[in-house]
Image (spheres, rainbow, N blue to C red):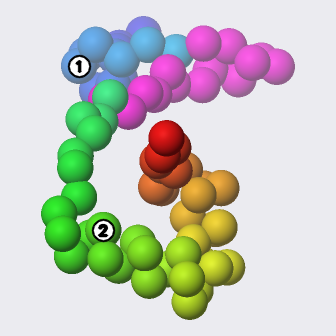
Amino acid sequence: MAKSLFEQLGGTYHEENGYLIPDLRLPDEEEQPIGLFGQQHLDYLKQYRRGTYINLLTSRRIKKKWSA
């Protein structure tokens, strides 16, 4: 049987319930600092758009900074 393009490029599969599922992983992302305007926007979300801020926190799109 000929290899698929995915296998030719180094991809692998694992079997679940009789189906072959491709092993897909995203590369690790570097943490990027936000600038002054990003910090001001985050403060605005915390104060005036609490629901949006909570949704971003729970979806892990932003991280909460713990202040001392």
- Sort mark 2 into few (<14), some (14-19) or many (20+) by Cα contacts within 10 Å: few
Q: Which residues are magenta?
A: 14-27
Label 1 residue SS: loop
- The residue drawn where x is 62% and y is 21% is 20
Instruction: Between residue 28 and residue 8, name the one nearer to us.
Output: 28
Q: Residue furthest left?
A: 35
Look at the image and say whether residue 13 sits in the magenta stretch.
Answer: no
- For disc 2, the marked residue is 39
Look at the picture and state if 1 lies above or below 34: above
In this rendering, position of residue 10 left or right of residue 49: left
The location of residue 21, given as percent across then percent down, is 60, 25
Spatial separation of the CA atoms under disc 2 and disc 1: 41 Å
- The residue drawn where x is 23% and y is 58% is 34
The location of residue 52, given as percent across then percent down, is 59, 78
Q: Earlier in the sequence, mark 2 or mark 1?
A: 1
Q: Of the residues tagged 2 and 1, which is closer to the observer?
A: 2
Look at the picture and state if 22 lies above or below 66: above
The location of residue 60, given as percent across then percent down, is 55, 50
Label 2 residue SS: helix
In this rendering, position of residue 28 left or right of residue 34: right
The label number, if any, that marks residue 9 in the structure image = 1
Indicate the amino acid at tag 1. Leu
Q: Quadrant of the N terminus?
A: top left
- The residue drawn where x is 32% and y is 28% is 28
Indicate the amino acid at tag 2. Gln
Instruction: Between residue 1 and residue 11, name the one nearer to us.
Output: 11
Look at the picture and state if 5 lies above or below 60: above
The label number, if any, that marks residue 65 in the structure image = none
